[in-house]
Image (tube, helix red, strand yellow):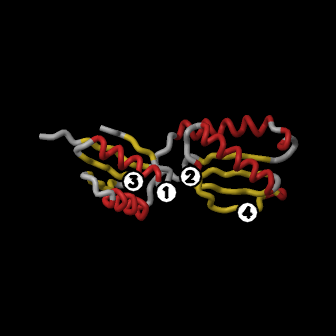
Amino acid sequence: MAKEYSFDISAKIDMQSFKNAINLVDKEVANRYDFKGTTYEVDYKEKDKLLVMVASSDNKLDALKDIVITKLLKQNLSSKVLEEQKTENSSGNNRKVTFKIVDYIESKEAKKIAAEIKNLKLKVTAQIEGDSIRVKGAKLDDLQKVIATIRSMEWEAPLVFENMR
């Protein structure tokens, strides 16, 4: 019997790297001249999977967002792990923005990914299994073509390719 290879497509994020990025944001902002004497806060709510940022103005809030995204990218995390929920006024004339942490593939997007894999007309199968997609095939080269094609497309979720067997 021929050996069958497989891999998973998911949107899991390395939470330790995420926490490290948030800690690095705190360190950098504490040392930045433009944040001296101003109010800022970066709060990661692990239970709710939320990241809340508070700054004294919209400009400071934008700078804080840029720092967070830069630190995420340096930790090899996609900026797509953060989905902005709402921006609002906070106490003391501060501005507050809330981000939801995205660590799953929505079912609509999973169906689109599976359809794209099917449209490649390679001898592979794609099965949606909860919050991941299992891709199986007899040839390793076909699976690598699938990975390259899916990576080259634009998706809403931060896709991760794992468990290549």
**In front: mark 3 or mark 2?**
2
Q: Residue at x 25, y 43 (%)?
A: 139
| Residue type beneath disc 3 | Asp
Asked if labels 2 and 4 touch by Cβ distance under 8 angstroms, the answer is: no
Q: Nearer the viewer, residue 133 or 17?
A: 133
Report how far apart the C-alphas of labels 4 and 2 lie in the structure: 21 Å
Q: Quadrant of residue 105?
A: bottom left
Q: Quadrant of residue 109?
A: bottom left
Residue 29 percent across, percent down from the top left = 76, 40
Q: Which residue is mark 3?
A: 131
**In front: mark 1 or mark 2?**
1
Asked if labels 2 and 1 touch by Cβ distance under 8 angstroms, the answer is: yes
Helix, strand or loop at disc 3?
loop
Q: Which residue is mark 4?
A: 88
Residue most extreme to the bottom: 108
Residue 63 percent across, percent down from the top left = 76, 49
Q: Which residue is mark 2?
A: 80
